[in-house]
Image (spheres, grey):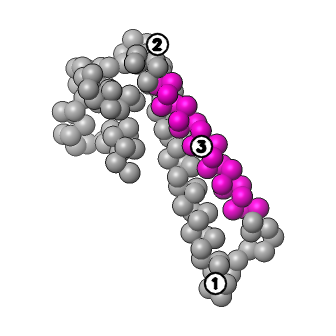
Amino acid sequence: MSAAEALAAERGAAARLVADLQGELAGIIAGQGENVPDDEHDVEGSSVGYERARVTALLAHAEARVAEADAAVERVAARSYGACEHCGGPIGGERLDALPTARRCVSCASAGGRPDRSLARRRG
């Protein structure tokens, strides 16, 4: 699979997840209606609040995945895809196969500093 195909697949999966989560969040909000639950006294209030916060966080994460895929497509167009943005060396084919949006090589990603967002996405 080419880099463009891998990135298109990653972006497509992330975009579908965004759409699903937006629908789920809209359903949660619509279910609440005008009756804002009183988390302290309403048995269901804390569950609804938790679900809304959970889906909101998942949605933000999925939107970040779409943005990472878009940034990787820009790197392909600029012919900088596959080069570590920290040291300039090659990221490596195996890493790009596993994490098509990777911005750093394994050495730089494991050395610390600002974490590779694509790696954090796969872990969490």
Residue at image coords 63%, 46%: 20
Disc 2 residue type (three-letter):
Ala
**How far apart are the two marked residues, 2 and 1, measured between alpha carbons?**
53 Å
Quick one: quadrant of the N terminus? top left
Q: Residue at x 40, y 30 (%)?
A: 101
Residue 43 disc label: 1
Which mark sits nearer the N-terminus, 2 or 1? 1
Instruction: Identify the disc placed on residue 77.
Output: 2
Provide the residue span drawn in magenta: 7-30
Crowd around label 1: few <14 · some 14–19 · many ≥20 (10 Å):
few
The residues bearing labels 3 and 1 have C-alpha atoms spaced at a distance of: 29 Å
Residue 103, image quadrant: top left
Residue type, numbered disc 1: Val
Image location of residue 123, percent across then percent down: 34, 48
Measured as percent of width and height from the top left, residue 84 is found at 28, 24
- The residue beneath circle 3 is 18
9 horizontally vs 56: left or right = left
Query: Which three-letter amino acid code belongs to the residue tagged 3?
Result: Val
**Residue 9 within the magenta-colored segment of the rendering:** yes
The total of numbered circles placed on residues is: 3
**From where the camera sits, is residue 102 visible?**
no
**Distance between the Cα atoms at labels 2 and 3?**
25 Å
Question: Residue 68, relative to residue 54: is it above or below?
Answer: above
Q: Which label sits in the foreground, 2 or 1?
A: 1
Element type at mark 1:
loop
